[in-house]
Image: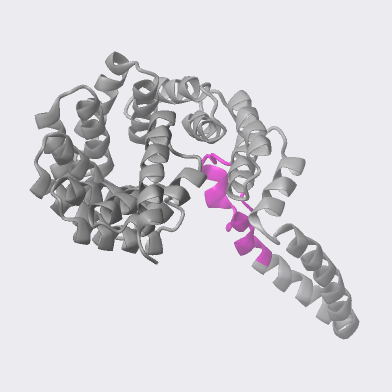
Amino acid sequence: MLALLPASLVPLNVLVNEHRLYGSLVFVSLGLAAVVVRQGRLAWAGVEVALVLGLLAHQRSEVWRDELSLWQDAVAKAPGMYRTHLHLGGALEQQGHLPEALRSYQRAAQLAPEAVEAHYNLGNALRQVGSFDEAAAYARALALEPDFFQAQVNLAALYLQAGKAARAEPLFRRAVQLRPEVAEAHLQLGVFCRAQGLLAEAESEYQQAAALRPDLAEIHYDLGNLYFDTDRYAKAIQAYQRTLALGPHGDAYYNLCDLYLRQGEYPRAAEIFAQGLARVPGTTKLYYGLGQAQDGLGLGREAAASYRTFLNSNQAPPALAEQLRQRLQTLDNTASQEPR
């Protein structure tokens, strides 16, 4: 009783916490042991208790096999508790079962409409399946907790994607005010400012993000794109090089080499395009850039092969595809007239 007294006096936010019984069970076990010893049945009683506890432990070990089985058991035993559905949704989402996770999050939100995390997690799951209902879920989370940073960032990004810049802007700016030390807040505000043509402010936000997280490749890539768009090619090259120093990035390879092509540095462009294809083989548009570099170097046969690989990927827009077919005819005609 003394061991349970603190838990009895302090209100619990969770209905059952089994660890609160551990202290009391120590004394219960000692009491049972004393009774068994007095009756002279120590050996057999020990075997009986061990068998029962072993069976129970085996049954529970199946439940505790993984997070999914644990929360499925919790939901079966406590279907009216929103936390069990919330955590089951997380376990399902982690294993890629998004439809089932959505149902769990929706049930959690129904059971506890005042639970911020239920609406936020529901919004994240809806986002993964491409449902626009996620905006409403994020909005409900913000209505309950107006300073919820990540919900602000996610909802603002949705508004920007939907062309609702006026609704996105205050959310982006509020996120930066709330968490000025978070690089993502500055990065997202920079993306917004660039989309609205506020290039000087976008550059400032990107630079602040880069100062906070110099190891985040996407920041340097976005900064390189800004320099590219404003014809500051030397700075763009530096930003793309920083991006690639942090890891493979197909678009950064393409944009960097495009700059070299514009400056007529065909050998350098061909070298980096080939490097990009080796490190990011799925980026087929690099074959188009490689073909341009080879074309500029007068390597007609190699350029034709690269152009054809790009065309066969079916990623070329119709106008570009037609342009490449015409160029291929010219290259093939030239190649046929060359001595073998």
Q: Is any part of residue 1 visible from this angle?
A: no
Above or below 167: residue 146: below
Q: How is the image coloured?
A: one colour
Q: Nearer the viewer, residue 233 or 186?
A: 233
Residue 63 appears in view = yes
Percent from the top left, x then y, of residue 150? Answer: 36, 35
In the rendered structure, the answer to whether residue 328 lies left or right of residue 168 reads right
Residue displayed at 72% across by 35% down:
79
Point 14% across, 53% down: residue: 238
What range is drawn magenta here? 1-25
Q: Which quarter of the figure is the N terminus placed in?
A: bottom right
Relative to 299, does residue 322 appear above or below in the rendering?
above
Camera-side residue of 200 and 5: 200
Quarter placement of the C terminus: bottom left
x%, y% of residue 319? 39, 29
Is residue 13 covered in magenta?
A: yes
**Residue under the image location 70 percent in, 60 percent down:** 64
x then y, percent, for residue 325: 42, 39
